[in-house]
Image (cartoon, rainbow, N blue to C red):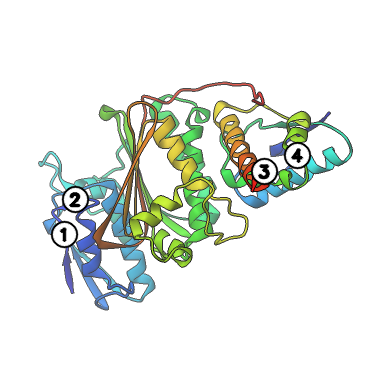
């Protein structure tokens, strides 16, 4: 299991480019066949831009089932957890609509 | 050219004041504008933000801006000049307060012109200030901080100005905080009507808040920001959000049952950019530790 403490790699969870850094680290882990634990230790809040780039963009490469199976989050909060789940819920449903059409 | 401030500087009276100052193309109506504060009886945070945006626009256009005012009268219970001076408004522009005894009130976070590059630090400092006022941890304010991050990311992604004027006022007796933030850019409807030209300005703002809707002003946009702002402030916090942009106004309140009640209208007045007037409650904030579980 690979552990990524986000603030070890970026100063803040704010912009798309902040998210890009984390997504690449997660992707490296997944490519190597490792599950990933993402730690938000020291992070008070995140933005949707960060979550979109760090996590949602993974849907371009991996299915949601793979993401759920191999990525988990620790040291987070209700606010961060809700945002992650809200974004995934919306984007995964949107993808299902596209497939249905 | 002398322009009188409204008696009551509110979200309603601001339109006429803006129109007197700049024309429809955002050009100053004079190369020297004197803002006359002697008519002012009352000013809300939104008025301070709008005034700041206007002064910034005038100065960038090379307009000379001067103030005409009465000295703050602290014998009056609610002297708007005392409020402005204590809010460091005059210090912001004149580099000194009008009254040497003026001092920042504990309930005010003074006017700031915040560029995106400084916005993260500004928000962190604002949340530190607020957490101390409310005897809460910064983590408890995560929903609010996230909502404000969305606003600055929106300014960065969609506005031509990339800078917002922000003013924050705490009302402890009312258990609320009012935050007013504005940028003078093209406005939300302008960008949306490029794709949907038949929408009114109010309809355009309503479309903008829909989760997933984006004009892709920047390629990475996924249309999550405004929806998340309303979700956090209105649904979670039971606060209120007003968005004024061009001729449109959108209001979002909690209906008392945890749902968002959204209404919009089109007005004759024109807001040259986007103004967000946010009221969030301080008595509904709770610190919730939670482990992450995929549903």
Which badge, 4 or 3, comes first in the chain's sequence? 3
Going by the image, does A54 lie left or right of B288? right
Going by the image, does B164 lie left or right of B200? right
Q: Chain of mark 1?
A: B
- State how far apart marks 4 and 3 are (Cα): 11 Å
Q: Quadrant of residue B49?
A: bottom left
Q: Chain of mark 2?
A: B
| Mark 1 nearby-residue class (10 Å; few <14, some 14–19, many ≥20) | some
Which residue is the site of mark 4?
Answer: A63
Question: Where residue B35 sits: x, y (%)?
Answer: 20, 65
Residue in the picture at 39% in, 35% down = B234
- The disc placed on residue B81 is 2
Which residue is the site of mark 1?
Answer: B69
- State how far apart marks 1 and 3 are (Cα): 53 Å
Q: Quadrant of residue A25?
A: top right
Label 3: state its secondary structure.
helix
Q: Residues at marks 2 and 4, common chain?
A: no
Q: Assess whether mark 1 and mark 2 are in contact (beta carbons under 8 angstroms).
A: yes
Q: Chain of mark 3?
A: A
Asked whether residue B97 appears in the rendered view, the answer is yes
Q: Nearer the viewer, residue B256 or B45?
A: B256
Question: Where residue B41 sits: x, y (%)?
Answer: 13, 50
């Amino acid at each position: 299991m690979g552990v990524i403490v986000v603030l070890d790699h970026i100063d803040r969870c704010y912009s798309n480019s902040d998210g890009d850094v984390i997504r690449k680290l997660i992707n490296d882990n997944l490519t190597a066949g490792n599950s990933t634990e993402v730690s938000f230790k020291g992070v008070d809040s995140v933005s949707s831009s960060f979550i979109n780039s760090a996590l949602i963009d993974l849907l371009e490469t991996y299915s949601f089932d793979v993401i759920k199976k191999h990525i988990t989050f620790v040291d987070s909060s209700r606010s961060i957890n809700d945002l992650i789940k809200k974004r995934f819920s919306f984007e995964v449903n949107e993808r299902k609509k596209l497939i249905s059409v | 050219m002398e322009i009188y401030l409204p008696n009551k500087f509110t979200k309603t009276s601001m339109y006429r004041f803006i129109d007197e100052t700049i024309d429809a193309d955002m050009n100053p109506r004079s190369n020297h504008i004197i803002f006359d504060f002697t008519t002012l009886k009352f000013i809300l945070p939104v008025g301070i933000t709008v005034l700041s945006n206007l002064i910034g626009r005038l100065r960038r256009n090379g307009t000379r801006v001067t103030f005409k005012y009465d000295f703050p009268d602290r014998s009056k219970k609610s002297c708007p000049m005392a409020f402005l001076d204590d809010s460091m408004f005059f210090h912001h522009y004149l580099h000194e307060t009008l009254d040497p005894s003026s001092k920042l009130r504990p309930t005010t976070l003074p006017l700031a012109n915040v560029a995106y590059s400084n916005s993260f630090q500004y928000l962190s400092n604002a949340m530190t200030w607020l957490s101390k006022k409310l005897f809460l941890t910064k983590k408890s304010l995560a929903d609010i901080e996230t909502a404000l991050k969305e606003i600055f990311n929106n300014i960065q992604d969609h506005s031509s100005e990339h800078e917002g004027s922000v003013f924050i006022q705490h009302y402890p007796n009312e258990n609320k905080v009012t935050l007013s933030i504005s940028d003078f850019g093209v406005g939300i409807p302008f960008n949306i009507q490029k794709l949907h030209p038949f929408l009114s300005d109010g309809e355009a703002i309503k479309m903008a808040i829909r989760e997933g809707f984006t004009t892709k002003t920047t390629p990475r946009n996924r249309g999550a920001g405004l929806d998340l702002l309303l979700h956090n402030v209105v649904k979670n916090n039971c606060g209120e959000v007003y968005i004024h942009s061009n001729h449109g106004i959108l209001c979002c309140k909690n209906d008392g049952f945890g749902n968002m009640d959204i209404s919009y209208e089109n007005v004759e007045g024109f807001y040259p950019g986007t103004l967000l007037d946010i009221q969030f409650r301080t008595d509904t904030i709770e610190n919730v530790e939670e482990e992450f579980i995929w549903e």
